[in-house]
């Protein structure tokens, strides 16, 4: 196994690899690491996944980096160390670090109400189901920035259940990539909450709203803020809300149908620049790029001498 990224054409931005070491030198078991890779290889052979990358790092060094299977079931290109993936909800930690940077900058507080930055949320109601009908009740307290960070906002996702509130989500245009972050936030604010803020944990579109707050506070599109404050400083050269046509041969793609359910799989086009820059799930990235973000966090907020966020804030 090679802990370095695959060679790339000179025209493609280079993401500096994290340092590598032999597994034994990091206190890792080569036999067990091989067994892990073999397990994924069996799944590829069984047809449950097209391919995977596997990375294990310890003490700031990579001890194992394997690429298994194919990038796409429709093509022969093997999975590679520099394959580009949709990272979906792993966008959330990056955006959450972004909002905490703005807390450090003194531009907002964790206790600030969301409506302070997005006024549409001031009039939001909670949807309470009663005998199959949805009754709207007033908020007991405002939704805060902290609620968004910990998914106690009362917002939800339509794919995590089938409540009456979630059915309203499904009937809306919330999934559209052709609306702005501002339009998405206003649309979400017009829908009822699934519970009172602070009352429950619900995995949700909360981080999308954090992304919109970042735009309001910074005066910049979310993509610009992330690039300037997090991605470029960490040299995450291949993380963004889309990738260039030149990278079309490096994209990880799924089976057309889910191997277990048979349902059709429809994922967004990584080559298409979206209008909505989803803070909750819109980024594409490579394994090495995301490893650099993870290592920054494990290192207390800095990497290669560049500090992104304070240790105590993190």
Image (spheres, helix red, strand yellow):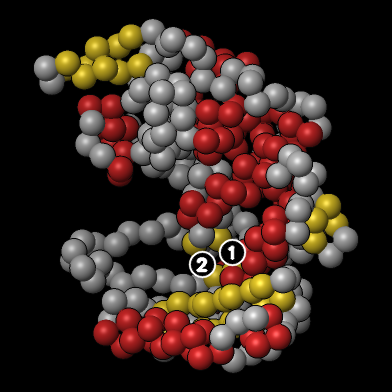
Left or right: where 80 falls relative to 7: left
**Residue 85: mark:** 2
Task: In this rendered view, identify the residue nearer to me: 81 or 173.
Answer: 81
**x and y, in percent, of residue 93 in the image:** 59, 49
Task: In this rendered view, identify the residue nearer to me: 246 or 175.
Answer: 175
Label 2–label 1 contact, CB within 8 A: yes
**x and y, in percent, of residue 303 in the image:** 80, 61
Task: In this rendered view, identify the residue nearer to me: 89 or 28.
Answer: 28
**x and y, in percent, of residue 264 in the image:** 24, 62
Q: Kindly identify the residue that appears in the image at 46 percent across and 23 percent down.
A: 198
Task: In this rendered view, identify the residue nearer to me: 232 or 160.
Answer: 160
Q: Kindly identify the residue that appears in the image at 41 percent across and 34 percent down.
A: 201
Mark 1, residue position: 285
The answer to whether residue 56 is seen in the rendering is: yes
Q: Kindly identify the residue that appears in the image at 53 percent across and 28 percent down.
A: 147
The local secondary structure at tag 1 comes to strand
Left or right: where 138 falls relative to 303: left
Residue 38 vertical placement versus 230 (above, below): below
């Amino acid at each position: 196994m090679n802990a370095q990224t695959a060679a790339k054409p000179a025209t493609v931005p280079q993401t500096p690899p994290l340092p590598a070491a032999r597994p034994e030198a990091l206190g890792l078991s080569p036999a067990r690491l091989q067994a892990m890779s073999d397990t994924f290889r069996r799944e590829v052979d069984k047809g449950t996944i097209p391919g995977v990358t596997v990375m294990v790092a310890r003490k700031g060094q990579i001890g194992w980096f394997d690429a298994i299977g194919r990038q796409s079931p429709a093509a022969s290109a093997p999975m590679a160390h520099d394959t580009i993936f949709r990272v979906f909800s792993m966008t959330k930690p990056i955006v959450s670090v972004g909002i905490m940077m703005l807390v450090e900058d003194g531009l907002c507080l964790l206790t600030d109400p969301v409506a302070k930055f997005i006024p549409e949320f001031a009039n939001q109601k909670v949807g309470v189901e009663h005998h199959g009908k949805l009754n709207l009740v007033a908020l007991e307290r405002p939704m805060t920035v902290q609620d968004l960070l910990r998914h106690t906002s009362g917002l939800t996702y339509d794919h995590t259940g089938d409540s009456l509130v979630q059915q309203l989500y499904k009937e809306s245009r919330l999934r559209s990539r052709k609306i702005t972050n501002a339009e998405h936030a206003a649309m979400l604010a017009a829908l009822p909450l699934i519970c009172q803020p602070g009352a429950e944990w619900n995995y949700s579109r909360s981080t999308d709203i954090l992304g919109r707050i970042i735009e309001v506070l910074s005066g910049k599109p979310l993509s610009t803020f992330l690039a300037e404050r997090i991605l470029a400083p960490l040299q995450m050269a291949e993380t963004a809300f889309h990738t260039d046509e030149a990278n079309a041969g490096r994209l990880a793609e799924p089976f057309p149908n889910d191997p277990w359910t048979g349902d059709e799989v429809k994922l967004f086009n990584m080559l298409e620049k979206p209008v909505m820059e989803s803070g909750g799930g819109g980024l594409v990235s490579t394994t090495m790029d995301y490893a650099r973000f993870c290592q920054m966090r494990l290192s207390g907020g800095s990497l290669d001498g560049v500090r992104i966020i304070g240790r105590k804030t993190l």
